[in-house]
Image (cartoon, rainbow, N blue to C red):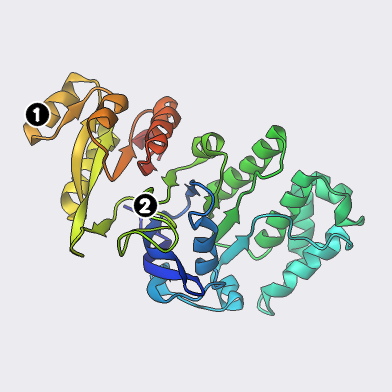
């Protein structure tokens, strides 16, 4: 597996006496789109604030490419390659588009000497912004304002982009345009960690999905269980505080599914609790291992509720399988077929 670009390990934090993140632990794959999906109030945005140094942690660690960046300043995080695009409109409406970009570039620091060239290149990439470069940003449409926010962050040439609700308030066409920008960034090697309520559309472009622990919430839940996000693979404490392996269902037992099965067996953090695949080969594999076998996710969820599921089916089945698991409160990791990796 590629070394993750970002790791959160046992992160605990909140506001005043309220604990929002209660042992949040997950990893983010490099050069991939990872989408955080979950209900309002689950702590998704708080996770981003913790990563970007806007929320001081009480416990735990955050690492970027193996370096501990816990509680770093925003300036230092920007220089390290993290860009944060928060929810809502975060522009200077009375200033021109060009001046918005120039002000955003102030955060770049003296080590970046080609900022004028970067601004012109960004305007060339987004013709709608180029056409309104010298007019007030308040005249832009909602989608254009979101593009302006994204472009302003990209001037710093980030390794990791944190973007909170990029589709909020946008028309379906503008949502697709915004997602196309994110896919283009991924193709260039940029890692995207995104919060998105539009689960179906977001999962279609995502490499992995991340969801809040359905049994935890702000200020409650077992120690180490995440109110802000649970990803796979990982571990959680049992009721006695002992680190118990997660029970993971494998959906799809083809080449990529079997590769994940080997990872589960070797990790010590997770156990394969079920294999969901209607083929005879998968049924034989489950019998050989002594693992429960189900022909469909529906059958599996009727019989058990695993801690998570790895979706390793063909692309056409990614979204339906993921949605069915998410609706049942089961976190998912979505994996592309080997041929597309």
Decide: marks 1, 2 in contact (CB < 8 A)? no
Left or right: 6 in relation to 114: left
Using the image, determine if residue 76 lies above or below residue 255. Answer: below
Q: Helix, strand or loop at disc 2?
A: loop
Q: Position of residue 281 (x, y in %)?
A: 17, 23
Q: Which residue is mark 2?
A: 231
Earlier residue among tags 1 and 2: 2
Residue at 25% over, 26% down:
277
Q: Nearer the viewer, residue 186 or 141?
A: 141
Question: How far, Cα to Cα, is label 1 from label 2?
Answer: 28 Å
Answer few, some or many: residues within 10 Å of disc 2's Cα (few below 14, many 20 plus, some between 14 and 19): many
Left or right: 132 in relation to 325: right
Q: Nearer the viewer, residue 177 or 112?
A: 177
- Of the 4 image quadrants, the one containing the C terminus is top left
Quarter location, residue 183 = top right
Q: Position of residue 103 (x, y in %)?
A: 79, 69
Q: Position of residue 114 (x, y in %)?
A: 73, 69
Mark on residue 287? 1
């Amino acid at each position: 597996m590629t070394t993750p670009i970002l790791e959160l390990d046992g992160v605990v934090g909140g506001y005043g006496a309220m604990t929002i993140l209660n042992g949040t632990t997950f990893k983010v794959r490099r050069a991939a789109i990872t989408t955080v999906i979950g209900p309002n109030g689950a702590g998704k945005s708080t996770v981003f604030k913790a990563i970007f140094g806007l929320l001081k942690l009480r416990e735990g660690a955050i690492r970027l490419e193996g370096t501990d960046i816990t509680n770093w300043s925003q300036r230092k995080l920007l220089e390290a390659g993290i860009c944060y695009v928060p929810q809502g409109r975060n522009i200077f409406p009375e200033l021109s588009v060009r001046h918005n970009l120039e002000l955003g570039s102030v955060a770049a620091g003296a080590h970046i000497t080609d900022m004028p060239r970067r601004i012109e290149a960004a305007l060339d990439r987004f013709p709608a912004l180029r056409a309104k470069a010298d007019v007030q940003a308040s005249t832009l449409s909602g989608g254009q304002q979101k593009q302006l926010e994204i472009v302003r962050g990209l001037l710093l040439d980030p390794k990791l982009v944190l973007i909170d609700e990029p589709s909020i308030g946008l028309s379906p066409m503008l949502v697709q345009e915004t997602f196309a920008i994110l896919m283009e960034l991924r193709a260039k090697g940029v890692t995207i960690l995104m919060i998105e309520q539009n689960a179906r559309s977001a999962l279609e472009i995502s490499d992995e999905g991340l969801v809040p622990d359905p049994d935890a919430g702000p200020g409650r839940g077992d120690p180490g269980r995440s109110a802000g996000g649970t990803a796979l693979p990982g571990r959680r404490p049992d009721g006695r505080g002992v680190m118990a392996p997660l029970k993971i269902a494998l959906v799809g037992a083809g080449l990529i599914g079997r590769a994940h099965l080997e990872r589960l067996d070797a990790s010590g953090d997770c156990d394969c609790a079920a294999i969901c695949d209607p083929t005879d080969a998968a049924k034989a594999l489950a019998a050989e291992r002594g693992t429960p076998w189900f022909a469909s996710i529906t059958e599996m969820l009727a019989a058990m509720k695993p801690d998570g599921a790895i979706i390793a089916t063909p692309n056409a089945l990614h979204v339906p399988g993921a949605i069915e698991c998410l609706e049942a409160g089961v976190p998912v990791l979505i994996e592309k077929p080997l041929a597309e990796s």
